[in-house]
Amino acid sequence: MNISIMDVHGRILKLPVMRRILFVILLAAGVMYVILHCNLWRADGNWLPSTDADKKEQFIACSFRSTFPSFIMLDKFYPFLCSNNFQKVSEHHGSHKVDPPYGIRRAERYFHLALSRLSNCGIYTEDDGSASCKRCVVVGNGGVLRNKSLGERIDSYDVVIRMNNGPVVGYEDDVGRRTTFRLFYPESVFSDPVHYDPNTTAVLVVFKPHDIRWLWDLLSGQHSIRTYAFWKKPAMHLIYKPHQIRILDPAITKKTAYDLLHLPTRFPKQVRPKHPTTGLIAIAFAFHICSEVHLAGFKYSFDDRNSSLHYYGNDTMSLMFQNEYHDIAAEQKFLKELVDQNIVVNLTE
Ligand SMILES: *[C@@H]1O[C@H](CO)[C@@H](O)[C@H](O)[C@H]1NC(C)=O
Ligand SMILES: *[C@@H]1O[C@H](CO)[C@@H](O)[C@H](O)[C@H]1NC(C)=O
Ligand SMILES: *[C@@H]1O[C@H](CO)[C@@H](O)[C@H](O)[C@H]1NC(C)=O
Ligand SMILES: *[C@@H]1O[C@H](CO)[C@@H](O)[C@H](O)[C@H]1NC(C)=O
């Protein structure tokens, strides 16, 4: 009797121990799987809607040149928000807990509404052909482009990325004709149809909640556009068609600010928080979609306040010194690093 009880007890005691060991092994395997899986898709850089198989393929196909340093390679992710998964992606990046420009909080509704109107969130159009890696040039609006006749050279890249209202019309010799992507915000986007280009994908950078609301107002055909929240009158209509418009994932802007420019995450109450310029955000965007990035028009002549700020118009450098929203010194330092380390080639040294 005693022995059989012991026997039974023995088995009863032993089994849970085995189970516990098995459980621990399985748990460890599970944790390893998650860690490996995360690292792999981080390195591959595809955080994509699984339904968008083509886009995913297209994106994976473009891996970086090995000379791109780890701070750019890590965490490469899909640059646009898509209506079918922007909430999931925002949670993944922590964007749901932060107001624009680095998140979507307090504007989720308008992100949702605007995205549901934009039929397309692909990177390249179909007729663009190959899913091969792209050589990109990011064209800044700097006065340094004047009279350099770089137009043909700029047009020779696979992808030409421009920003804001830097015109092509009338400046073709110096800045080229093609525009693959144009990053913009409501105060900076063209409203004159003379600048319309059917081959351009226009990418909204959302700096404040009203920017995404503005897009929704325009897409939904609102006649009374709210303009009070803007530092300059925003465009009252869009020259681009909805299928040409994308919304940049705020995680790209956040990465530009913190990982590339190392801007502080907090500012004292009396100091205006600084955010990256569209130009630097465009460079970060290029790192996500290109295998090679070249720059033009990113140099300023700080020692001559009368020199031209842009390659167009009459603004002078003195305007740059009044800027409180950006940290131009940090941006110039970062650009110098990129060039010094041969991460990018600067056509306008
Ligand atoms: C560019 O060239 C034009 C015409 O040749 C000239 O009038 C202008 O002063 C030049 N601008 C600069 C910045 O050199
Ligand atoms: C748009 O692309 C097509 C096809 O590549 C080309 O023929 C046309 O000239 C381009 N239009 C502009 C405005 O660049
Ligand atoms: C800049 O322009 C202002 C007014 O046009 C002029 O008075 C000043 O001498 C100029 N400065 C330089 C360094 O050219
Ligand atoms: C720039 O200045 C010139 C000469 O003063 C003037 O004719 C032109 O309209 C100005 N351009 C802009 C965009 O203000």
Image (spheres, grey):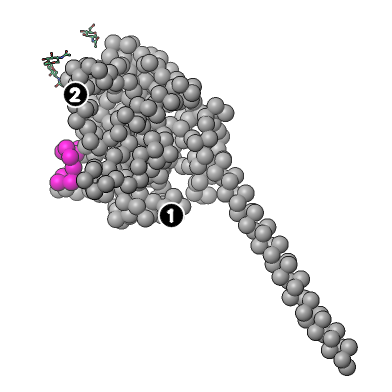
Image position, residue 117 (x, y; %): 33, 48
Front in this rendered view, residue 30 or 204: 30
Image position, residue 311 (x, y; %): 26, 19
Question: Which segment is the magenta one?
Answer: 227-235
Image position, residue 231 (x, y; %): 17, 40
**Rendered image quadrant of residue 44:** top right
Q: Around disc 1, counting alpha carbons within 10 Å, would you say few (fewer than 14), some (14 to 19), or many (20 or more)?
A: few
Q: Amino acid at mark 1?
A: Glu
Q: Amino acid at mark 2?
A: Ser
Q: Dot 2: what SS?
A: helix
Q: Which mark is residue 271?
A: none
What residue is shown with label 2? 318
**Quadrant containing the C terminus in the rendered view:** top left
What residue is shown with label 1? 91
Residue at (46, 32) in percent of width and height: 287
- Real-space CA distance between mark 2 and mark 1, rounded to the nearest whole angstrom: 41 Å
